[in-house]
Amino acid sequence: MASKDYTQLAEQIVRCVGGKENVSGVTHCATRLRFTLNAADKADREGVKKIQGVISLVESGGQFQVVIGNHVADVYPFVLKALGMTDAEAEQNKGGEKAEKQNLVNRFLTTITGIFTPIIGAMAGAGMLKGILILLTTFNLLATDSGTYRILYAAADALFSFLPILLAFTAAKKFGANTFVSVAIGCALVYPDMTAAYNAGDALTFLGIPVNLMSYTSSVLPIICAVFAQSKLEALLKKVLPSMIRNLLTPLASLAIIVPATFLIIGPVTNTVGNTLAAAYTALVSFCPPVAGFIVAGIWPLCVMAGVHYGFVPIVINNIAVYGRDTLFTITGVCNMAQAGATAGVFLKTRNPELKEISGQAAFSALIAGITEPAMYGVNLKYKRPFYFVMFFSAIAGCITATVGAGASALVGTALLTLPAYAGVGFAGFLIACAIAFFGTMICTYLFGFDDSMIDNA
C-alpha cells in the first residue's frame, strides 16, 4: 500500500469508530489496532468490517480491536495523524470507556496488553537468538567460551536479565507515572550491588527492618506493582504539594518510598504470588499432560479469536524466569501451524484468484512468522469448517506437545523462523506435533473443509 492508501484507510477507520472525539487512546500489536473508545455505541461496527484493508473486528478486554494484518505498524502513524495524537498521548489511554465502567477482567486484559505488547517483538528476537545459540553449541559449531558466543549470548540474554527496566518503561506509560522515575525503580531492582548481596546470602536491613532479598532478574509482577504504587503516590503528591516544589520533591519521594517498599513488601509478596502461579500451572499440566495439552490447545484458537491471549503473557514470562523455559505457549503454539495448514488447504483448493491471493499470503504469514490473524479472520473463521479442523488438530498436536514435555526458552510465537527457541527437551516430539497440526488441517480442509461454492455464502 502507498502512503496515500494508508491515509485513506486510517481516516475511514477513525470515522467508523466514532471520530477522533470518541477515541481516548490507541495502541497496536502485531496485527491489530487497539482502540479505547469513550462510547462504544457510537462506533459503526459494520462500517469498520466493510473497509477495504480491514480483516476483522474484535471487541475484547474493553478494547475495540481492528484487525489489519502484518502492516499494522505502517498504518498506525497515519491513524495517529488522523486522530491528532502523539504516540505518547495515544498509549496513555486516559478516559475511554472509563476504567470504572469496565469489569475487572477487561481492566486486567487492557492493562496487560498495554504493558507487554510494545516489548513482545524484542523478546521474540532475543528468544530466537537464544535458540540458535543452543543449536550451535549442541552440534559443537560454537564454543561457549568463545568471544563470539559470549557477545551473542549477551545480546540474547540482556533483555531478560534487565526485564524489569523495560517493563518499568511500558508500565509507566500505562499507569501515567513519571517514566524516568519508573525506570530508575526498575534499575534499583537489578542493581549489581543488590544482586550480589542476594547471591552472597547477605543479611540486609532497612531502618532496622530485615530485607527478604531475592532475585528480580526476569521478574514481572514486582516492577508492575511498584510502578502502579508509584503512579498512585505521584497522584497524591500532585494534590498536596505546592507547584513550586512539586517537580523536585515528587521524584525524590517516589524513589525514597517506592524502592524500599518494593524490597520490603511488594517484591516478596508478588514474587511469592508468581512462584505459586508457576507451581500451580506445573502441577496442573503434570497431573495429566495429554489431557491438559488436548484441552488447552483445543480451546486456544477461541482465546485468540476473542483477543484474550495476551492475558497469559505474564504467566509465560514468569515460567521462564522460574524454570528457565515455558510449556504453555509451546502447547498453544501448535495452533499457529494448524491455522497455517487450514489456510494452505483453502489456497490449494480454491480457483478464485482473489481468495487464492489472500489465503496464500495468510498461510505464508502464519507458517513463517506465526502471525495468524489474517489466516484466522480472513479465511478460516469466514468459511467455518477450516476453523473446526484447526481446533481439532490443535488439540491433537497439543496433546503430543504436552506429553513429550516440550518447552521454549523465550516468549515467541510458533513459526518456522522461531523453531530454534524450542530446542531442548521434547524438541523432536514438538516438531512432529507441528507437522501433524499443519498437514492434518491442510489435507482435511482440502478434502472436506472448503470448496468455492462456499465463497458466496460466507
Image: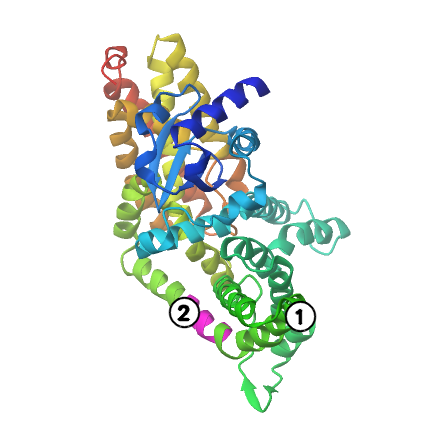
Q: Quadrant of residue 289?
A: bottom left
Q: Is residue 335 magenta?
A: no
Q: Which mark is residue 95?
A: none
The boundaries of the magenta stretch are: 267-275
Residue 287 image position (x, y, % from top left)? 28, 61
Q: Is residue 271 magenta?
A: yes
Task: Name the residue furthest right.
Answer: 147
Residue 431 appears in view? no
306 relative position to 178: left or right = left
Q: Quadrant of residue 396?
A: top left
Q: Nearer the viewer, residue 232 or 452?
A: 232
303 relative position to 218: left or right = left
Q: Nearer the viewer, residue 372 or 108?
A: 108
Q: Which mark is residue 245?
A: 1
Q: Quadrant of residue 356?
A: top left
Main SS category, magenta section:
helix
Question: Closer to us: mark 2 or mark 1?
Answer: 1
Q: Looking at the image, is 303 positioned above or below residue 346?
A: below
User: How far separated are the C-alphas under marks 2 and 1?
Assistant: 38 Å
Disc with the residue nearer the chain's start (2 vs 1): 1
Residue 236 image position (x, y, % from top left)? 51, 69
Residue indicated by mark 2: 273
Task: Give amino acid for label 1.
Answer: Ile
Q: Looking at the image, is 377 positioned above or below residue 330?
A: above
388 relative position to 401: left or right = left
